[in-house]
Image: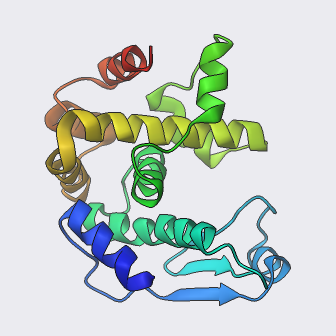
Amino acid sequence: MLERIWQDHRVFLGDAPKRDIVAVFYSTKDKFTGTHELTSNIAGIYDGKVRMPIPDRPNWETIRRIMSHEAAHAFLFDIGGPDIPLWLNEGLAELLAQGPDRPTPSLDYALGKNEPLVKIRELTDTLKNLKNNTSAALAYDESFSIANFIHGRFGVFGIRRFLRAFKEGKSEEDAIRTQLFMTPDILQQSWKAKLK
């Protein structure tokens, strides 16, 4: 499973980490969340190592998806450096783990109710300060949807260029301007127009 994830991510991103990705598996969810003082809704983390619980009767597709998401963070960190905006990091991890057809129920609900969406400029702070499962689900849905929009518009080569801009030290705004050829506000407007 891990080898397949590695190959899939390497093909999509055009590169791979120069070092091994270490995975640590916990025998129970309690050991996993207790060890890292995490909330119970966290299914895995990447903190330099992929960490996740494996239950007694695992759903292997769920395990693959979580492992793929967390391994994507290792790839993204290595390829784009530590300054990739969190929304892009999480959005691309979701895209790599679940593909472009991943459902976005929280985003769909917010759009259906005409609720305001988080602006791209504020999405990283929102992801860092999640207060509840509803805001977490919406922030992840938005992050995925924006990353998927960028992928749809610029392809894998555009994603790769975008990531390299962060590795080269460009700010979020500069990377969007130089690699996506628009301002963050225009990116937000273009993405929202595509949702309708």
Q: Position of residue 53 (x, y in %)?
A: 70, 79
Image position of 127 with respect to 188: above or below = below
Residue 115 visible in the current orientation: no
Residue 16 visible in the current orientation: yes
Q: Position of residue 69 (x, y in %)?
A: 49, 64
Quarter assignment of residue 47: bottom right
Q: Nearer the viewer, residue 119 or 139?
A: 139
Residue at point 21% right, 24% down?
A: 182
Quarter assignment of residue 129: top right
Image position of 46 with respect to 13: above or below = below
Q: Position of residue 132 (x, y in %)?
A: 79, 42
The type of colouring in the image is: rainbow
Residue at point 31% right, 68% down?
A: 9
Q: Quadrant of the N terminus?
A: bottom left
Residue at point 23% right, 48% down?
A: 159
Q: Position of residue 151 (x, y in %)?
A: 28, 41
Q: Quadrant of the C terminus?
A: top left
Image position of 181 with respect to 116: above or below = below
Going by the image, does 132 lie left or right of 181?
A: right
Quarter assignment of residue 104: top right
Residue farthest toward the top in the current orientation of the protein: 114
Total marks shown come to 0
